Amino acid sequence: MTGKVGTNTESRKVACAASVAGSIGRTPEHLLSSREHKSVGTVVDIGGVPVGNTELAVMAGPCAVESAEQILRIAREVKASGANILRGGAFKPRTSPYDFQGLGKAGLEYLRAASSDTGLPVITEVIDPHHIELVVKYADCLQIGARNMHNYSLLREAGRSPRPVLLKRGLSASYKEFLLAAEYVMAEGNNQVILCERGIRGLSNELRFTLDLNAVPYLKDRTHLPVIVDPSHGTGNARLVPAMSRAAIACGADGIIVETHYSPKDSISDAIQTISTAELIQLIRELAALAKVVGRRIPLPLVK
């Protein structure tokens, strides 16, 4: 006996559950992202840059867009380093309501201008479901931050958008919770999802977070989605970012997302975990050498 389920989305969920259950004899909790549903790894396209194939993604830029001049200079230096995606925050969810919250729409306009100048696609965070319609006009990829991993309204709305979604793991989220958060996006029809391990709360008080690199091989084994690592937030310490970036690539990550600034000490937010653009150049050269060892690659720019 068959019957119509309320919406097209609900019908798709039921059909998927029946299909997967029929093929393996049980229903995985994370249906759409599971290896049982799709054995071949997904390659996500961010403005023409593939994430999840043999070429590693390096997303770099400031924590926050501070001015048109600042983001343009950083974008040009990021481009020169060999990184292939520009990151920058226009809307900033901060722990304190008194901290800098971002430039909003003006920040998005500055990001788009920097993208047009350099040719780098843009990833930026969205924190409110009502902002998505605006953000997709300027960004090539939507980022959902750790604090919003359980924001189901935001996840669903991002799933209805035409842009890829980078989903960060919550501060205390289990792997299961992380995968099910991605499922909320995918259940709405958006299969272009990237998972990002960005550190969790641990027992150490010396570092901002504990970067859980176990997550990379674990997730790669259970999902076809690309997995990248954020060593900036994962350590909260710029001096540790290069080492943990190398470790991320060594354990199988499809790329990294790092905070960088031409003068980190002058950065309005997250200065302590931001590497300089000069350090970014050196880091990418190290990662390019390491990538060859693990069967991946980072194309380096020609030295003039």
Image (cartoon, grey):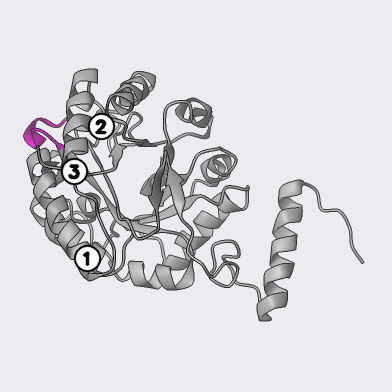
Is residue 89 in view from this perspective?
yes
Query: What residue does disc 3 label?
Result: 301
The image position of residue 263, as x and y in percent, is 8, 33
Nearer the observer, 299 or 65: 299
Identity of the amino acid at label 3? Pro
Q: 293 left or right of 221?
A: left
Is residue 206 in view from this perspective?
no
Q: Nearer the viewer, mark 2 or mark 1?
A: 1
Query: What residue does disc 1 label?
Result: 292
Question: Which quadrant of the figure has residue 209?
Answer: bottom left
**Which quarter of the rendered picture does the C terminus lie within?**
top left
Query: Mark 1: few, some, or many residues within 10 Å (few <14, many ≥20)?
Result: few
Relative vertical location of residue 296 with respect to residue 167 in this rendering, above or below: below
Nearer the observer, 275 or 119: 119
Helix or strand or loop: what does disc 1 sit on?
helix
Question: Which quadrant of the figure has residue 227?
Answer: bottom left
**Which quarter of the rendered picture does the N terminus lie within?**
bottom right
* Label 2 vs 1, first from the N-terminus: 2
Q: Which range is magenta? A: 261-267
Query: Mark 2: few, some, or many residues within 10 Å (few <14, many ≥20)?
Result: many
> How many angstroms separate mark 3 from mark 2 (CA)?
26 Å
Relative vertical location of residue 66 with respect to residue 278 in this rendering, above or below: above
Relative vertical location of residue 38 with respect to residue 82 in this rendering, above or below: below
Pointer 3 and pointer 2: residues touching (CB < 8 Å)? Answer: no
* Label 3 vs 2, first from the N-terminus: 2
The image position of residue 21, as x and y in percent, is 69, 74
